[in-house]
Image (cartoon, rainbow, N blue to C red):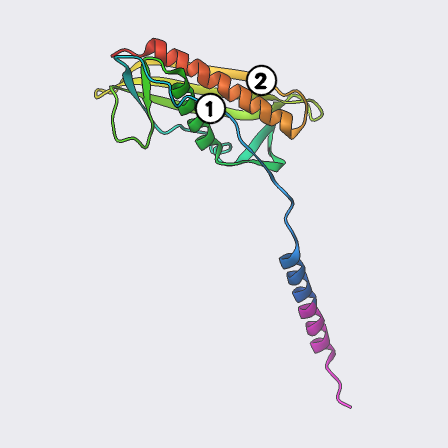
Amino acid sequence: MNRVPSRLLALSAALAGSLGLSACALLATPDPVQLHRFGAVTEDYSGVQAEAGSIEVSLRRVEFPLSSEGDRILSVTGTEAAYVAGARWVEPAQDLFTAGLEGAFSARGGRVRLLGPRELARGTLALDVDVRNFEARYASADAAPVVVITARARLIALPGREIAAERVFTVERPAGDNRVSAIVEAFDEGTRDLTGQLVDWVETSARP
């Protein structure tokens, strides 16, 4: 009777175990992820028109920190940072913020007409927005966080590129509870608050 060498048996067992693990990995289902959005203008502004003699302002690409520009929700506790498990933004936060800002200008229908980054026309002013903070901050691990959004905005005169006006905006919105839905609601309310302030400032600061 032929005997299989013990080393070959060990190798066969290892290969079988490896194949079994691979099969399990292929059959395993990932943990469900809930998608969320923020900053959307819910009002119907399709009939809103800018005032006569409006000022056209070109929106530059909105800048975001690398840690929060994507679709993950950033939380910070002291010097530690982590992403909220089981939840993501439906699009990159940078894109959702930009869409919310454009929607806020469209809903206002004031004397400023915002030209989005994709529009070919060029305004007499450019709006530069640099979001410095976009995070949920925890004072302690068991407390509800405070959503902090900070953005520096600059109005730049064209074509000379002189800074016509500059301001830093900060919004802090406490979450009602330490749950994902409450944290997302705080991001949504905080974003709409900040973009509303930004629209007011541009309307006041923009000069032909």
- The amino acid marked with disc number 2 is Arg
- The amino acid marked with disc number 1 is Arg
The residue under the point 42% across, 16% down is: 198
Name of the residue lying farthest toward the right: 1
Is residue 145 something that shows in the picture? Answer: yes
Q: Which residue matches tag 2?
A: 173
Name of the residue lying farthest toward the top: 204
Q: Is residue 58 left or right of residue 20?
A: left
Task: Classify 10 Å Cα crowding around label 2: few (below 14), some (14-19), many (20 and above).
Answer: many
* Residue 125 coordinates in the image, percent (x, y): 27, 19
Q: Quadrant of residue 144?
A: top right
Q: Secondary structure at mark 1?
A: strand
Q: Quadrant of the N terminus?
A: bottom right
Q: Which mark is residue 76?
A: none
Nearer mark to the viewer, of 1 and 2:
2
Indicate whether 35 appears above or below 4. above
Q: Secondary structure at mark 2?
A: strand
Q: Which residue matches tag 1?
A: 132
Q: Quadrant of the C terminus?
A: top left
* Residue 77 coordinates in the image, percent (x, y): 63, 26
The residue under the point 64% across, 25% down is: 182
Q: Which residues are magenta?
A: 1-16
Name of the residue lying farthest toward the bottom: 1
Q: Is residue 10 magenta?
A: yes
Q: Is residue 77 magenta?
A: no
